[in-house]
Amino acid sequence: MLNFKKKYYFIILVILLLVSFYVGLLLGSSNLSIKESFYYLFNSSSDDITADIIWKIRIPRLILGILVGSGLAACGAAFQGLFRNPLAEPYTLGISSGASLGVSISVILGFSGVFIPFYAFIGSFISVFFVYTLASRKNFLNSTVILLGVIISFLFSSIVYLIFSLAKPQEVHNIIMWLMGDLSSANNLTIIITAILVILGIFTLIFFSEDLNILTLGDEKAFSLGVNPERTKRILFIASSFITGSCVAASGIIGFVGIIIPHISRKLIGVNHRYLIPSSALIGAIFLVLSDTIARIIIKPMELPVGVITGIIGGVFFLSLLLKTDSRDF
Amino acid sequence: MDILNVNNISVKINELKILDNISFNVKKGEILGIIGPNGSGKTTLFKTISRILKPETGNIFLYNKNITSYSEKELSKLISVIPQMINVQFPFTVEEFILMGRFPHSGRYGYSIDTDYEIVNNVIKNNGMDSIRHRRINELSGGEKQRVIIAQGFAQQTNLMLLDEPTSHLDIYYQVQLLNLLDKYNKECELTILIILHDLNLAASYCDRLIMMKEGKIFTQGTIEEVLTYQNIEAVYNTPVIVKENPIIHKPHVILVTKNLK
């Protein structure tokens, strides 16, 4: 039952998201005034540089920020429930290293542009597949999963370093730029594909959120409540992998969103995944849009990769969380 | 009338025979206790009845229908299972947790306010949990937590409930309170209960019949008086005991002979 308190909570989040979207629209290498912004937003016929900045640069970038932020945060919440481990998220499970490997290989093979996201997607899928198969053989014991993620990460990054040492400096530079995580590089096609996969994925997670609640009670209890643990885990895992794969493909590696946002969200709305997943998605979107805005203006006229901002905020947050409470707590 | 018929089941785990040719029936409305030493196959028996494990041979009929012919959802509407250990890591509220018992009936599309919430409200009220309904489950004491776990089973509204040593970590206050609660549901809601108990005296007080297991086989089954004799207990547990009559409820009472008496 969506009681009044929860209803207001979600309304406030949506308003905050709209506000951050608008702030992100105004601020940048050249700031817009509120009056200008309204003029350009509602006169799509105007045809000057400012209109181009708004419609071709800022809005796609903000949309991508919303998609990636919500996708990574929703997946983080789902993975943490699925593995009953508060440290689980797309990146601690080794998915980013798979994407890095995919990208490194594609750059070495001389592909560029459109193909890089595709290879990132394939790479992250392969690592997810590895972790999933190995984890299911170990009965999804929550500590082994993270360990597996770490091992896969090391393995794949070693191969990436191997490629680095053999590649030309320009190629290494291209790979590193991509790895840093950036919302600016995506083209419209990537954004559309990402939008479809992320939205479908998040709806799948929400649809199965009650199953996920029950899975957190352990397989035996889940079974006696009519949830098939194997099948449900597979569905949730595949949905999360599609979301993660498309997010990584569109924006590179943007760390920590998948960990800190679900944690904040649990503090605000509780652990019921029916609310936790949509709430994480909204807060993730707000967080990434604001982080990206900071990344764009903090060293004007230059830009930082947004992964640097989320990494720093997330790292500090995470450390304090770890020191303050027992890390096994949700 | 029989709710459950277990016919000649044998179960192997990793080539090791855990259950050997087990047969028994559960009558509608009874409390059937299962006793036996550690490792005698009691929990495996429960897992087989709740279809987590597949029997090598034999079959299990629920309402005269093989349990393999039920879907997961159908089965979860008929049998609720309270496993030995539930580690609730996620701090759900008591209300949220009990509501999950309604999943087999409503589930994925959301719980209905008229039926599911009404049932959960009743369960909370009947079990005196109003004061803790918004507390987080991980903040509760062991005894309260176990009550909430069983309340979830009540909300599931099945005809048969399997409980695997529900009292094992509780003090005597909660042990008695919990078994009184089960007794109440058994009498008032005609809930048939199959319960594994370690405490022979609690089993004697609350169960209508007993099954005594040893090394994967049924050693004996029958009324309390038939099963709880000192000969049976000494043969199965390999421990000397004295069996007297409980002066209040007039059921057998088992007294351990604890020290080496010379």
Image: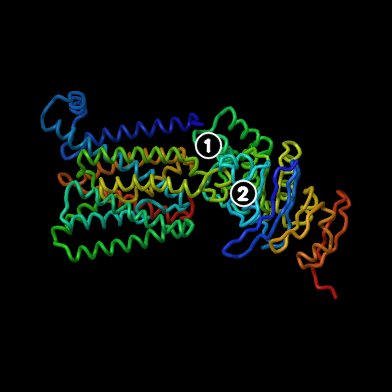
| Circle 2 SS class | loop
Residue B76 in the image, given as x and y percentages of width and height: 59, 42
Circle 1: residue type: Gly
- Name the residue rendered at 43%, 45% in the picture: A235
- Name the residue rendered at 24%, 64% in the picture: A161
* Distance between mark 2 and mark 1 Cα atoms: 20 Å
| Circle 1 SS class | helix
Foreground pick, B29 / A188: B29
Residue A53 in the image, given as x and y percentages of width and height: 16, 35
- Name the residue rendered at 72%, 36% in the picture: B189
Disc 2 packing (10 Å; few <14; some 14–19; many ≥20): many
Foreground pick, A280 / A97: A97
Instruction: Using the image, tell me which numbered label, if any, was put on residue B107.
Output: 1
Which quadrant, please, contains the N terminus of chain B?
top right
Mark 2 lies on residue: B50
**Contact, CB < 8 Å: mark 2 with mark 1?**
no
